[in-house]
Amino acid sequence: MTGMTVETNLIALAATVPMIVPPQRLRADVVGVKSAVARPFEVDDVDWSAGCGSILSSLKNGEFLAGVSRSPLTASVRWTPNPTNLTCQYYAIFYNPDNNRQDTQTGVDDLGVQYPLVPLWFENANPGDPTKFDLHGDTFFPIDFAGRKGFHISSVDSDDLGTIFNLRVYDAIADVIDRQLCIYRLNGTSWELVNQQFLTDVAPFGEGHYNTAFIFHTTGYYAMAYVSTHANDTARHVNISMDFMVRTDAWGFLPIPHLVGVQDNIRALRVNAVSVMLTPHAPFMYEGGQVVGVQLGQNQRWDTVLGSSSPLQTLAKIDNSCMLDLAKGIYGYMRMSDLTTSVYDTPFEIQEDYVVGTTNPLYPAGGWLLIAATAAKIGSEDSIAYPGAACHMTTVHGIEFQTNNTWFDSEMCTMSEDAAKHAYQLIATVPQWHENPLHIREILNSIRAGTKRALAIAPTLLQALSAIVPGFSAVSGLAGVLQGVGRLI
């Protein structure tokens, strides 16, 4: 077995089963660049068995939709039921260049200039509090599109449950004529103004202090701008704070796990592998329903699959989709056609150890890997439930990053260009979607030029998998894996 074949197989395995095969360093555009690798993963309960509390028009009871991407700041999106209508609150974090604090925004209020309210991110006001709705985890990032930064709002047509956006303007000048907050909604490929409010129409809560709130009744992407058009205005500073509260079922957006907290150690990163697995753990008597997986193209938004029919039915009509029984779960990996789809990105702009900007495209490179499911229901009328919808969702991102921190093991990539090309050709032949009990064996069987090295590490990999995936048995799965690997050598 040639050295290039060993190298090729490891690259292909790392891209198709990143859960158990460590990330591989890929060839960089600039030869001689050192990089470190990591494999952050997350296992979450995505139990929608109780149905939904306040039903959004985009999903019905018993339905579920989630997706993963290669975007570091919006690595996954998932439908998050809130059956008891708990409240979550997220505070905007801004960069204040005057005192290097990430708290409030200091904007220069110039003649005729619109100031987008662009937070670096939003932080959970009550992280880990079981009495609160943990929608976006600890951190939520805005997206970049068409010259504005916006964020996704989930809401319903109800003043009691709608998402509320709060804005406070502190130490504003006494003359606030023609100063207003504008709210834009993304309509197709452009932002349209949907609401505006002058500060003069807002009751102040102290000299120069103003507070205003908007209730969102339509789900979608929104952006904000603080606008001044006063004819006699001169440059001034205005301190602004903002937050939003959600009290309904909603779409949750999560970055790569644990990325926030180490971001000042990362000069650039790229995502070389992504996988998602939905694992049901409901009792056998409640099994039922279907699950479908598909990879959307580069220019398709994840929410384009929401419409009059269920997400499962919509995804099932897309080419290269795969439908399976929910009882057996589903595993899929993101397919990349060549090395050009894995390039270094700089999601954080760092100055003097402070994050001063973020980049988070609405259309992530490589598109979205989506899974949709429907669970069988039991009961009738007011007592309907979906017990078969109790699942775990496991997401894995194989990342490579550049850093100056010596705590991370940075090395040069030794991969040959030919091995990389052959690996990506091989990946294109590996089936993308699998039933959970079979996915490792099937993928290994697809990579037919396997090596004794793969056989040697298989037991260790399976034990690692059993440690991070609830319900997975390394012992029962090992025989099938070894049988599959045995055919490769």
Image (cartoon, rainbow, N blue to C red):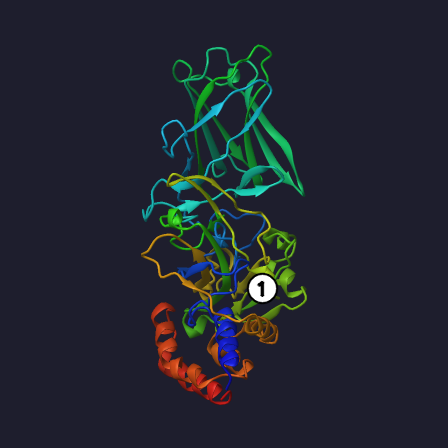
Q: How many marks?
A: 1
Q: Which class describes the residues within 10 Å of circle 1: few (<14), some (14-19), or many (20+)?
A: some
Q: Locate residue 275, reporting x and y percent.
A: 49, 65
Return the residue nearer the eye: 17 or 329.
17
Q: Locate residue 25, reporting x and y percent.
A: 47, 65
Tell me if residue 399 can be seen: yes
Secondary structure beneath disc 1? helix
Tell me if residue 219 can be seen: no
In the shown orientation, is residue 132 left or right of residue 174? left
In the shown orientation, is residue 206 left or right of residue 6? left
In the shown orientation, is residue 300 left or right of residue 475? right
Q: Locate residue 412, reporting x and y percent.
A: 44, 64
In the image, residue 312 above or below residue 21: above
Return the residue nearer the eye: 158 or 268.
268
Q: Residue at x 65, y 53 (%)?
A: 299
Q: Residue furthest front?
A: 32
Q: Residue at x 45, y 30 (%)?
A: 166
- In the image, what residue type sits under mark 1? Leu
In the image, residue 70 above or below residue 324: above
When asked about the image quadrant of residue 20, the answer is: bottom left
Q: Residue at x 37, y 81 (%)?
A: 459
Return the residue nearer the eye: 233 or 320.
233
When asked about the image quadrant of residue 113, the answer is: top right
When asked about the image quadrant of residue 238, the answer is: top left
In the image, residue 453 above or below residue 64: below
Q: Locate residue 224, reporting x and y percent.
A: 54, 32
Residue under circle 1?
339
Return the residue nearer the eye: 64 or 122.
122
